[in-house]
Structures are given as C-alpha cells and as structure tokens.
C-alpha cells in the first residue's frame, strides 16, 4: 500500500497538518489566519481547512481559539490581569469575540471564571486546575462528548 501515490500524498498532507497545528500551539498569541497558515505549508486555504477538520475534528480557526481560551483560563486563574488584558495577551483583537468564544467553550463569561477561580485557587494546585478546567464546547458537553453520525 505504501507505493500508492494517493496514500503517499495523504501522509505528506498529515505531516503538513501537524506542522500547522504545532505552529498554532506555538504562535497562538500572534495574528494567525487560515491563508497565512496554508501558505506556510504550501496548501490552499480551502484544502487546509477541509483536511484539518478531517484530521482533528475542528477547523484551524476553532483549534486556534481553543488554544487561546486555554491560555486565557490560565491567565485569569493567576488573577493579576484584567479580562481585557488577558484578551489581548492571548492574541484576540476583539473583547466581544473573545468573551463570546470564552463563554461558549467554558460555560461562563471570563469575568465570572476569574472571580470563581480566585475563590477556589487556594484549594486546588495549579497542575490540577489546568486538567479539570480544560475548555469543552457546550454542544460537546451536552452530548457527553460522543458524536453520532
């Protein structure tokens, strides 16, 4: 099967998708868009979006926003930055979009999360709070994380 040209292309695409995902993980606070990510791996934006969704179950933009929200959660738990400062620190340029996406993923607005985290912080080590507070999309939580086709 390894001599199949389509299979070989699929493996090359997967390697490029990993590079895109790794770049998003590293540069989440930078201004990133699908066109720039696609150019970086010599793919069209449409092809990258379709293949990324097939490989990882979400679009490159959704993956980027999830990384940004994860980092925002850590900064909000720390408690020394305002919600606006956290928004810009993680690479979001719109406080409204940031707050909406945060609420979708976490289930509460960033200001509520920050207040709740401040009250719980002394009781839970940071290594544990990162694991138990990982963002989950509300629609995924409602179906118990299982997707039926």
Image (cartoon, rainbow, N blue to C red):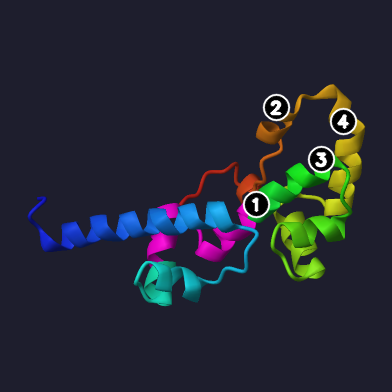
What span is colored magenta in the figure? Answer: 50-67
How would you classify the magenta stretch by its main secondary structure?
Answer: helix
In contact (CB < 8 Å): disc 4 and disc 3: no
For marks 4 and 3, give the CA distance.
9 Å
Residue drawn where x is 74% and y is 70% of the image: 93
Do we see residue 149 in this rendering?
Answer: no
Q: Which numbered marker is on residue 137?
A: 1
Of marks 4 and 3, the one in the foreground: 3
With 31 as the anchor, is 41 left or right in this view?
left
Residue 102 percent location from the top left of the image:
74, 56
Q: Kindly check if marks 2 and 4 are in contact, taking CB atoms under 8 A apart as contact.
A: no
Question: Image height check: is 104 above or below 97?
Answer: above
Chain-order first, disc 4 or disc 3: 3
Mark number displayed over residue 77: 3
Q: Does the magenta-highlighted stretch encompass residue 63?
A: yes
Q: How packed is label 2: few (under 14 Cα within 10 Å), some, or many (20 or more)?
A: few
In the figure, residue 31 lies in which quadrant?
A: bottom right
Question: Residue 61 in magenta?
Answer: yes
Report the residue at 83% width, 53% height from top: 110
Element carrying mark 1: loop
**Element at label 2:** helix
What residue is shown with label 2? 128
- The answer to the question of whether label 3 and label 1 lie on touching residues, with beta carbons closer than 8 A, is no
Q: Which residue is mark 4?
A: 120
In the rendered image, residue 2, in percent from the top left (x then y), is placed at: 11, 51
The earlier-in-sequence mark between 2 and 4 is 4
Q: Are marks 2 and 1 in contact (CB under 8 Å)?
A: no
- Within the image, what quadrant is residue 80 found in? top right
**25 horizontally vs 65: left or right:** left
Q: Secondary structure at mark 4?
A: helix
Earlier residue among tags 3 and 1: 3
């Amino acid at each position: 099967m390894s001599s199949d040209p389509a299979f070989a292309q699929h493996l090359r695409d997967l390697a490029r998708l990993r590079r895109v995902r790794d770049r998003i993980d590293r540069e989440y606070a930078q201004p990133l868009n699908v066109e720039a990510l696609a150019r970086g791996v010599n793919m069209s934006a449409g092809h990258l979006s379709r293949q990324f969704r097939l490989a990882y179950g979400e679009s490159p933009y959704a993956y980027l926003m999830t990384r940004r929200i994860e980092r925002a959660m850590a900064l909000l738990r720390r408690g020394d930055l305002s919600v606006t400062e956290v928004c810009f620190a993680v690479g979001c340029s719109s406080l409204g979009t940031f707050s909406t996406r945060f609420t979708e993923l976490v289930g509460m607005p960033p200001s509520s999360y920050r207040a709740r985290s401040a009250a719980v912080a002394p009781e839970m080590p940071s290594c544990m709070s990162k694991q138990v507070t990982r963002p989950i999309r509300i629609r995924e939580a409602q179906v118990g994380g299982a997707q039926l086709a």
